[in-house]
Image (spheres, rainbow, N blue to C red):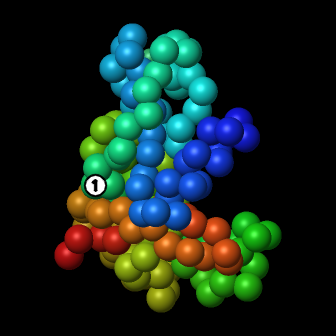
Amino acid sequence: MEFRTAKKFYDNLAKGKIYGIRCRKCKKYTFPPLLRCRECSSESVEWVVMKGTGKLHYYSSTMLPAIKFVGEPPSAYGLVEMSEGPVFLTKINNADISSPDSIAKGNKALPLPVKARVRKIAGMDIVTFDIKK
Ligand SMILES: [Zn+2]
């Protein structure tokens, strides 16, 4: 992410607002926000607040967390398709990762609706999702 784009994105996340961009040309959404549309590369884009809803398609657990999260407990990561279309990989707060069997069982129930929740983890604001049960 380009610096000014990243700053705007994270400044808004701190206020609980999840921004993406929408392309004026092809009308598709890009998330996380970039300077140009991920679908057609147009630079004619506008910032929009994402609904924060979507579907979880797959999840697993972190065996080796990213270095910045090394002090955090193991957690679930999953592939979320946002209602606006973009797909991204992020932390899932309430997925069962207690054993390989529970992960397999949890995945069999997918896709399930999810709701975004901005959480502060290791000092960073992160877009995470809760499975709606
Ligand atoms: Zn486009």
**Would residue 77 be seen by someone viewing this image from the given angle?**
no
The answer to which quarter of the image holds residue 104 is: bottom left
Q: Residue furthest right?
A: 67
Query: Toward the viewer: 46 or 132?
Result: 46
Point 43% across, 76% down: residue: 93
Point 36% across, 62% down: residue: 116
Query: Where the C terminus falls, by quadrant?
Result: bottom left
Decide: is 66 above or below 43. below
The x, y position of residue 17, in whole percent, is: 41, 56
Decide: is 73 above or below 78. below
Tag 1 secondary structure = strand
User: Is the residue at mark 1 in contact range of ligand 1, meaning its CB lies under 8 Å from it?
Assistant: no
Query: Where the N terminus falls, by quadrant?
Result: top right
Q: Give, as a three-letter code, the residue at label 1.
A: Thr
The x, y position of residue 72, in whole percent, is: 66, 84
Q: Mark 1 sits on what residue?
A: 53
**For the residue carrying disc 1, how many other residues have a C-alpha within 10 Å: few (<14), some (14-19), or many (20+)?**
some
**Would residue 56 be seen by someone viewing this image from the given angle?**
yes
33 with respect to 124 (left or right): left
Query: Toward the viewer: 114 or 3?
Result: 3
The answer to which quarter of the image holds residue 53 is: bottom left
98 with respect to 5 (left or right): left
The x, y position of residue 18, in whole percent, is: 43, 52
